[in-house]
Amino acid sequence: MKIPKSRSDQHVVLEALQRAQRGDMPFDRMFGYVYDPGPEATEIANRAAAIFQWKNALDPTVYPSLLRFENEVVSMMASHLGGDDAVTGNFTSGGTESILLAVKVARDRARALLPHIARPAIVVPSTAHAAFHKAAHYLDLDVVSVPVSARTHRADPASMERAVTDATILLVGSAPSYAHGVVDPIEELAAVAQRRDLLLHVDGCIGGFLLPYFERLGAAIPPFDFRVKGVTSVSVDLHKYAYAPKGASVLLHRSKDLRRYQLYTCSRWPGYTLVNPTLQSSKSGAPLAAAWALLHYFGDEGYLQLARELRDATTRIARAVEGMPDLRLLAEPEMTLMAIASDSVNVFVVADVMKAKGWYVQPQLGFDGGPPNLHLAINPSNLERIDAFLEALAASVQEAKGVGPGELAAQVSGALAGLDPSAIDASVLRQMLAMGGIAGVDLPERMADINDVLDALPHAFKEKLLAEFANEIFRTPEGA
Ligand SMILES: *Cc1c(COP(=O)(O)O)cnc(C)c1O
């Protein structure tokens, strides 16, 4: 494809964008990916973003406005999460960046203070977000993934402590975990961290903003933030339950001394002196301005009210799901997330039928002996749609009944049984994708076959296949 030869009229360009998005799903029918605050808040975020879109937060001395917003947003999050005046941090582009930086702090601190550790490791509960594995991959660290309690899906502090060795530099807990929506026992993990002189990061990416409101509404949530001595850093995404547009997260540290390991500076080149607190260098002021604007627009009371409505909706969905004979919850939701499994229908088929009816629920593969399931993250735009959603879910379960595991899964897992993943070359993987219907430009309507295949494969195979998938879908458009 080439850059269009001639200019286009602005109306033509904007019309093309509008047309392109017709195939995208409306937010109020999605129970994942998007945390939509409704039309008025969206308009305010859009305007705030538009004012600061073109400003570059690369150099905090050039735009005092952006430095001020960042310090204010960070300070609001520190006090929201039980921090004192010593707690400090930065605004980042998302949970992954916050987690990457939290892991970098642990690594660089170990390099400075514990140079005898040749190959440092982080110890995480098996439910920790994939971003910790990604961070360890990028930063060249080992991950020790410790199985959680099969019953509660919460981290098991005793097992985590047993996994600590002389090479351990960081412990992790989630508040709550993404997949099951339950809060790890942070106080117990903090006690381990203190006994073993380790850093402890609390992944509050999805819950750090909302859980304090749930607590105020009376939910029995044990302390998970800076109120707990031994917690050294907390990540909290504003582009989730603070309803900011994507590109908004905060990483908080217990002290400036810890934050110092996060910073990167460079003068070894002829250009401007580089002072980067976070991963990005040139960065738009838009996400920060939009997040700042929404914090003021909703205010504490606005967020509390939305939390109340989300809590009631979550309870309603959870009770309805429990009342459906074919479905069960993997854990009682502590916030607004739930995982729904079935012993009688293929949940991947349910997800496809839901999609055909215009609803998005997120499939999760079986893990650590646990079953495949459907993940819900309930957001404000879903609130008006709960009854319709539950009806569609019940109908989809009925339609999915009797649809067994696809041929493909059996064929593929039979063919791969006993093979060494490293011996499988890309052309074989591409054939497998083609069998699943991923060869042309269009993604398949039905994902159940592909999810069944993935579900049956060992991790090394899954990951190779997913890489091949990504390598296929990002490509020159057909006919270009
Ligand atoms: C969303 C999420 C992340 C990753 O955040 P991104 O913003 O997608 O990079 C990490 N941890 C948890 C618990 C999350 O829910």
Image (spheres, helix red, strand yellow):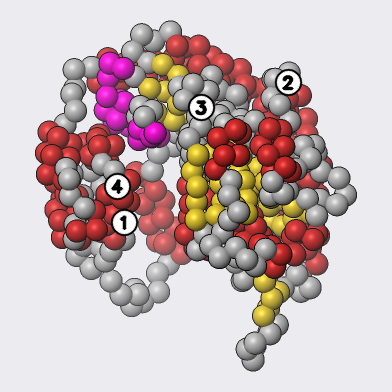
Measure the alpha-carbon separation of dots 3 and 1: 30 Å
Q: CA distance from mark 2 to mark 4?
A: 41 Å
Q: Position of residue 365 (x, y in %)?
A: 35, 35
Alpha carbon distance from label 1 to label 2: 43 Å
Amino acid found under the numbered disc labelled 2: Leu
Q: Which residue was labeled with disc 4? A: 462
Report, in whole angstroms, how far the alpha carbon at label 3 lies from the one at label 4: 24 Å
Q: Nearer the viewer, mark 3 or mark 4?
A: 3
First along the sequence among labels 3 and 4: 3
Q: CA distance from mark 3 to mark 2?
A: 27 Å
Residue stretch rendered in magenta on the structure: 343-368
* Residue picked out by circle 2: 217
Viewer-side residue, 41 vs 356: 356
What is the residue that sits farthest to the bottom in this orientation? 270
The residue that mark 3 highlights is 149
Question: CA–CA distance between discs 4 and 1?
Answer: 9 Å
User: Dot 3: what SS?
Assistant: loop
Secondary structure, mark 4, is: helix
From the image, state whether disc 2 or disc 4 is nearer to you.
4
* Nearer to us: label 4 or label 1: 4
Q: Amino acid at mark 4?
A: Lys
**Callout 2 secondary element:** loop
Question: Which residue sits at x=69%, y=76%?
Answer: 265
Q: Residue at x 61, y 17 (%)?
A: 312
Q: Which residue is mark 1?
A: 467
* Mark 3 or mark 1: whose residue is earlier in sequence: 3
- Labels 3 & 1 near each other (Cβ < 8 A): no
Camera-side mark, 3 or 2: 3
The answer to whether mark 3 is within 8 Å of ligand 1 is no
Amino acid at dot 1: Ala
Of labels 3 and 1, the one closer to you: 3
